[in-house]
């Protein structure tokens, strides 16, 4: 079984359905209010677990009701939570999400305990890093912690997937250590300070990024790797809620790569998982199983 180590965020998502995304200063009357377990790290961990990976999570929640619920949710998906710490000082992280009628979303995050995930937290999981088939990280926890995790993975020759979200500038030194970089269009522009996608891609390759996988939403995915530059078209589905599409993609990609599937096949697994995720409400509730993804791929051949 593919062993995936995820270092990242664990949030409770507070979701309101709205007819349209509010403009600055505008009040919009929403519809249903729901809470869902979320956080990019936890979402990707759940996505990987449902794809059949053996997943361990490194992160923090608060000593509060949300924290208890979040850990319980991970356990129910057979994710190892030995290294999920209940922080004495900080509350569990939350995300306030407005989901518009077309499925697009606006998200505001209060990091809480996620901001306290430390270098020591990563080093305490050193024995698991040594045994991992792949490390999966994002940017909702402190950058120094993510850097430490990547350095440790390099020391143990563990491949690294970095989903550079939320978008922020990253050093060339850090990017050069990443085996698989999975930005969306906006994150690519932020990383490279280039609005032109081709110029941005060239910069990242020049900086030492080995495999670049750009998710383009309903426009599919562009993969620049192994001397190839290919565009893979998106699956046509009816979007209900796009909240965890990228997380579904990254979790499925991690498992497929850990199982030593060829890169383009692994990307197809990720795209199928992402397509299925947008057809359901909520972050973690929308993440598909391995069976659902493989049935979906079979039906599209």
Image: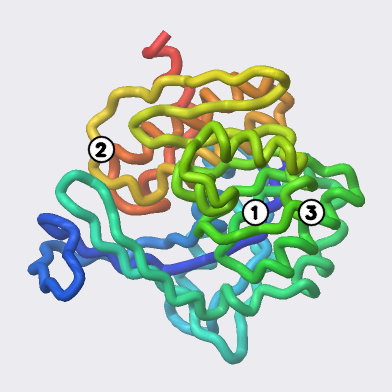
Is 18 displayed left or right of 170 in the figure?
left
Residue 137, labelled with which disc? Answer: 1
Give the Cα separation between the discs numbered 2 and 3. Answer: 37 Å
| Quarter of the rendering containing residue 145 | bottom right
Vertical order, 135 against 239 (above or below): below
Q: Position of residue 108 (x, y in %)?
A: 37, 69
Residue for point 52% across, 23% down: 268
Is 154 displayed left or right of 144 in the figure?
right
Under circle 3, the secondary element is helix
Under circle 2, the secondary element is loop
- Density class for disc 1 (Cα within 10 Å; few <14, some 14-19, many ≥20) is many
The residue identified by callout 3 is: 173
The residue identified by callout 2 is: 239
Residue 50, labelled with which disc? Answer: none
Is 300 displayed left or right of 209 in the figure?
left
Give the Cα separation between the discs numbered 3 and 1. Answer: 16 Å
Residue for point 42% across, 52% down: 284
- Which is closer to the viewer, label 2 or label 3? 3
Vertical order, 195 against 225 (above or below): below
The scheme the figure's colours follow is: rainbow
Q: Residue furthest top?
A: 301
Residue for point 53% across, 55% down: 165
Residue for point 71% across, 51% down: 5
Which quarter of the rendered picture does the C terminus lie within?
A: top left
User: Does the image show residue 29?
Assistant: yes
Give the Cα separation between the discs numbered 2 and 1. Answer: 26 Å
- Which is closer to the viewer, label 3 or label 1? 3
Between disc 2 and disc 3, whose residue precedes? 3
- Pointers 2 and 3 in contact (C-beta within 8 Å): no
């Amino acid at each position: 079984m593919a062993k995936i180590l995820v270092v990242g965020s664990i949030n409770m998502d507070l979701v309101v359905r709205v007819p349209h995304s509010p403009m600055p200063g505008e009040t919009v009357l929403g519809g249903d209010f729901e809470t869902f377990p979320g956080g990019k790290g936890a979402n990707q961990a759940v996505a990987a677990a449902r794809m059949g990976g053996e997943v361990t999570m490194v992160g923090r929640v608060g000593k509060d009701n949300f924290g208890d619920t979040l850990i319980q949710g991970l356990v129910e998906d057979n994710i190892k939570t030995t290294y999920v710490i209940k922080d004495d000082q900080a509350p569990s992280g939350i995300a306030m999400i407005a989901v518009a009628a077309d499925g697009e979303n606006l998200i505001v995050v209060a990091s809480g305990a996620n901001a306290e995930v430390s270098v020591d937290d990563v080093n305490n999981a050193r024995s698991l890093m040594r045994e991992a088939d792949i490390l999966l990280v994002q940017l909702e926890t402190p950058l120094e912690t993510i850097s430490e995790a990547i350095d440790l993975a390099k020391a143990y020759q563990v491949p690294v997937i970095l989903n550079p979200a939320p978008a922020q500038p990253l050093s060339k030194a850090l990017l050069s250590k990443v085996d698989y970089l999975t930005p969306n269009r906006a994150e690519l522009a932020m990383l490279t300070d280039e609005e032109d996608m081709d110029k941005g891609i060239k910069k990242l390759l020049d900086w030492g990024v080995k495999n670049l996988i750009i998710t383009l939403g309903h426009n599919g995915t562009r993969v620049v790797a192994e001397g190839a530059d290919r565009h893979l078209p998106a699956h046509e589905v009816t979007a209900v809620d796009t909240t965890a599409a990228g997380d579904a993609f990254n979790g499925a990609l991690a498992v497929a790569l850990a199982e030593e599937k060829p890169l383009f096949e692994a990307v197809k697994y990720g795209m199928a998982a992402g397509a299925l995720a947008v057809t359901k409400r909520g972050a973690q509730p929308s993440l598909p199983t391995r069976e659902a993804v493989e049935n979906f791929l079979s039906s599209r051949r």
